Image: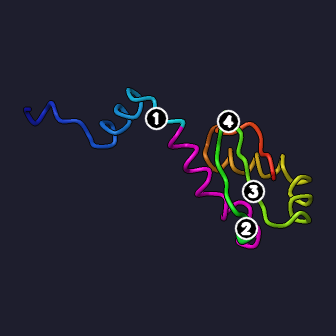
Amino acid sequence: MKKQDALPIGEIIAQFISEKNIGQKLDETQIMRLWPKIAGETVNAYTQSMYVHNRTLYVRLSSAVLRNELLMLRSELLNRLNTEMGHPVIDNIIFR
């Protein structure tokens, strides 16, 4: 490979992600990493598990009272998560 044929590493990674169709999975993983920042450390302490399926974030909480509070804040949390990502990644949040 000649020097003028070299591509920046960022471009190579973006091309790989595009070819392998793993961009959505990477975004979903990033959403789960953002949860403590967006929801707060207190909410995160009561979060038992979470996963994304069909553009829906499922969050299992250990407190029914907190679950009811978060139900009222669902649209705000959804908006903040997608805004932080820079594009829509999830369409709904379900608290269990």
Of 81 and 57, nearer the camera is 57
Label 2 vs label 4: CA separation?
22 Å
Q: Are marks 4 and 3 in contact (CB under 8 Å)?
A: no
**Residue 13 rendering spot, x and y as whole percentages:** 34, 39
**Three-letter residue code for mark 1:** Ile
**Three-letter residue code for mark 4:** Arg
Earlier in the chain: of badge 3 and badge 2, it is 2
Image position of 39 with respect to 58: above or below? below
Crowding around mark 4 (Cα neighbors within 10 Å: few <14, some 14 to 19, many 20+) is: some
Q: Secondary structure at mark 1?
A: loop
Crowding around mark 3 (Cα neighbors within 10 Å: few <14, some 14 to 19, many 20+) is: some
Residue 40 marker: 2
Q: Are marks 2 and 4 in contact (CB under 8 Å)?
A: no
Q: Secondary structure at mark 3?
A: strand
Image position of 46 with respect to 60: above or below? below
Of 27 and 53, nearer the camera is 53
Residue 60 marker: 3
Earlier in the chain: of badge 3 and badge 1, it is 1
Q: Which residues, given as a range, are shown in magenta?
A: 25-43
